Image (tube, rainbow, N blue to C red):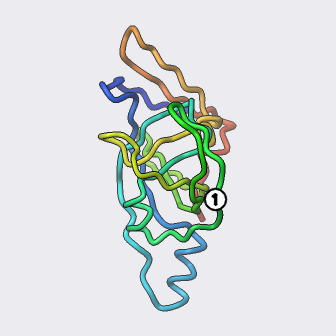
Amino acid sequence: MTRIHGEIRPDGPLIDIVLSCSQAQSKALLAAGRNPPTQFRAQALLDPGSDRTFVRQEYVSHLGLVAINGGPVTGSAAGGWANLYYASFAIVLPDGQTPWRDLEVLGSPDTGPNATAILGRDVLNYCVFHYDGPNRTFTLDFRARCKWITKRS
């Protein structure tokens, strides 16, 4: 089993991620003779109260993501409607591996002071998330059968 264990910081449980444009967008750019935007490493807040993953809008713009649709949003603090994008996304595992998935993400003007993204239930549904408030720690377990832990081709 792959496990991420961390400290709950004042702004919540944060993990390292890597963001990139989707595989399809990257292939289209290369076919057109253009280089895809550089992927970047960032931190994401784990939020089981959010039904989807959010990425701060400035990074959506940096990656050149194109809105594919709009969608309803349910978060811990609010709801509404937001633009939907495809992005490639990787959770940085303790062994340094970064298994990639293309994922629909929502653009957001704010993801918190230290987070570039908010990981919602669309990602957390692949894991066991244990929040230990009294000890100020969290654990994210990816079971052997987990569909998230796959390599990007």
Q: Position of residue 114 (x, y in %)?
A: 30, 41
Q: Which residue is mark 1?
A: 70
Residue ID at (63%, 67%): 68
Identity, as a three-letter code, of the amino acid under mark 1: Gly
Look at the picture and state if 129 lies above or below 119. Answer: above
In the rendered view, would you say 60 is above or below 123? below
Q: How many marks?
A: 1
Residue name at image x 44 percent, y 62 percent: 60
Say left or right for 54 vs 74.
left
Q: Residue furthest bottom?
A: 33
Position of the N terminus, as image quadrant, is top right
Residue positioned most to the top: 134
SS category of the residue bearing label 1? strand
Identify the image quadrant of the C terminus.
Answer: bottom right
How many C-alpha atoms fall within 10 Å of the one at disc 1: few (<14), some, or many (≥20)? few
149 sits to left or right of 140: right
Could you say where residue 14 lies in the image, as x and y percent from the top left? 38, 35
Q: Indicate the quadrant where residue 115 lies.
A: top left
17 is higher (above) or lower (below) than 26: above
Residue in the image at 44% along x and 57% along y: 19
Residue 100: image quadrant is bottom right
Q: As displayed, is residue 25 above or below residue 108?
A: below
Residue 9 shown left or right of residue 63 in the figure: left
- Camera-side residue: 80 or 71? 80
Q: Position of residue 126 (x, y in %)?
A: 64, 37
